[in-house]
Image: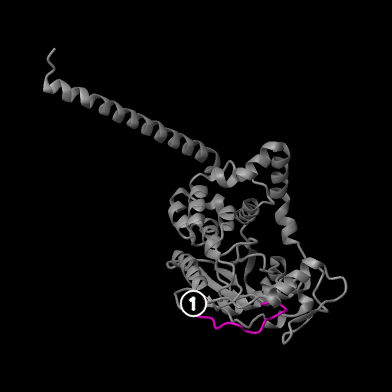
Amino acid sequence: MTVSRGEIIASADQPAGTASRSRLRVCGYCLAGFLLWFLLDAAVFRSNLYPSILEPESSAGNCELMFWNETHRKPSGLPEVAVIGNSRLPLLPRISNELTAQTGYRFANAGVAGSSPRCWYYLVRDLDPTTRRYAAIAFAVDDYDDEDTWWDDADSLLDLYKIIARLRLSDVLEFSRSFRSTENRWLAFRGSLFKGFTYQRDLYAFLRRPKDRVANVRWQRRESAGWIYDYNGEARSLEGISVDWATRKITYPAGLPQPQRQVVEDIVQRPAFPQTGRLGAYQRFWLGKIIDRYRNSDTRIVFLRLPRGPIRRPDLVRKKSSSIRELASRRNVILCDEHAFDSLERLELFMDPMHMNGKGMRAFSEIMAGLMAQTLGPGRKPGS
């Protein structure tokens, strides 16, 4: 039997073509599976469905509770100032608002514990989508100078878990690329693209006791705004602590709990860290994005420096930059006097080395109300 050259070539090509078609089918199935997975994930986690039942005590749930309370707060009809920061923000809006007759402004605390400028950008974007809601937005920062420490805000995955409900599909690339390490970039990309990864632990807890979760969320949304607004702060203080900076010996008052002692020791014993400029770069980017959103708005962006704390370390490093002062040169940006709260840096006004007690919070809120009126001028409605 004679076989032609053409038949030999055709016979040789057939397995290759079959393998190619098989690979295409496998790729098609994978793509279809990927799209189905994404659509299911988006249907549950990218709608308002799941964020509405987040555990209020979780990182994301706490952020969403603040967002819910602020977006459902009845407008006062007066010029409003939203103050944004982390757990160190000691603002009691009730106290500041008692001075509205003198200041002309109403105040709202939009702070979220553990948050940083990357979180603030996404929060502000959704709290004020028109860029016209507030007369001013004040950002409470620890320092106007940039001091790098062991903690790197740019590489903190905590931001993913706090702000996940505010992230849109269009945010995925920029958000994930803003992390410093390759590992965290990947985790942020995966967790913001497929939100189910980020919500996984919360979802498991919900499925164990769904009725209790729903009831708790409803109660928190109904009642929390009231008791947060009426909060008076803690009574305990750090009175009795002293530090000999020459020997770094700390004297504690009797009965001070060990966790508070440990925080004091961490502050006193912390070594100086190399100054690389990473904090300055991080703040320029994210705070700069916030300022850029308001470049055509009458809303003013204000920076204020929080009380540094009652245990102030001697300066151990030469800070390389001041990103906050640099940003203050832009339109509509105001820098408050950095020494406005120096008088509050006293042991009796703090419940731990970082956070003010009730007495300190009240004093801060009174000073801040006057400071905003002095800084912003007479109260006027946004856009007027």
Q: Give the range drawn in magenta.
A: 308-324
Residue at the spot 59% in from the left edge and 67% down from the top edge:
151
The kind of residue tagged 1 is: Ala
Q: Name the residue under label 1.
A: 328
Is 348 on the left or on the right of 86, as rendered? right
Local SS, label 1:
loop
Is 315 on the left or on the right of 255, as rendered? left
Up-down relation of residue 9 to residue 172 (above or below): above
Q: Residue 86's x, y, as percent?
A: 63, 65
Up-down relation of residue 288 to residue 26 (above or below): below
Is 91 on the left or on the right of 164, as rendered? right
Farthest top residue in view: 1
**Residue 159 visible from this viewpoint:** yes
Q: Residue 159's x, y, as percent?
A: 57, 57
Say if the magenta span includes residue 129: no
* The quadrant where residue 242 appears: bottom right
